[in-house]
Image (spheres, rainbow, N blue to C red):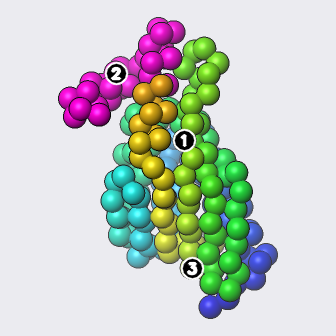
Amino acid sequence: MGWSRDELEKAYADYRETVVRATRTRDWNHYADQFTEDAKYVEHAYGTMNGREAIRKWVTRTMSSFPGSRMTSFPPSWYVIDEERGWVICEVQNPMEDPGDGTEHNAPNITILHYAGDGLWSYQEDAYNPMNFLSATKRWCAHAEKCGNLPDDARAWLDKMAKMGV
């Protein structure tokens, strides 16, 4: 089923605004609400979530704990729209907050969205190299520690990674 360019542009603009609002308020329920009840979310490091409520549970847990809790925004670098099939594909940046010395720490991902109509999405996949995120997060921790700003949740995360041999 084809969608108009205008409808897909509006739906994607609403999606981006919802991400901004969720990041600002730290309430990720709004984010989950933009998926259909039977949506599928494929996340390469965390697995596959089936259904809006599974997405809600995963995103609220993930974005309220380190390192997600230290990501400040998720701006897209670029996006393309397939009007005929209802796909939106974009590169998303994942910058972390300033660790205290002005350095920037970020790792991008490719997000694939399938539009279901009525402003809802039926599918999302985030494709990325988890090792790039791991490296960026470890660098952020090293800078935060050097500045005396390493929070307890980041220290616990580092300890967990060390125990895992990562």
Between residue 133 and residue 8, name the one nearer to us: 133
Q: Position of residue 80 (x, y in %)?
A: 70, 68
Query: Label for residue 116?
Result: 3
User: Which residue range is magenta in the image?
Assistant: 140-166
Q: Which of these two is toward me, 32 or 110? A: 110
Question: Decide: marks 3, 1 in contact (CB < 8 A)?
Answer: no
Q: Which residue is mark 2?
A: 155
Q: Nearer the viewer, mark 3 or mark 1?
A: 1
Residue at the image point whose x is 35% and y is 69% from the top? 50
Label 1 belongs to which residue? 107
Q: CA distance from mark 3 to mark 1?
A: 28 Å
- The N terminus - image quarter: bottom right
Inspect the image, locate mark 1, and give the three-letter code of the amino acid beneath it.
Ala
Q: Residues within 10 Å of mark 3 (few under 14, many from 20)?
A: some
Mark 2 belongs to which amino acid? Arg
Mark 3 vs mark 2: in front:
2
Residue nearest the viewer, comparing 90 with 14: 90
Q: Residues within 10 Å of mark 2 (few under 14, many from 20)?
A: some
Measuring 66% from the left and 47% from the top, which residue is drawn there? 75
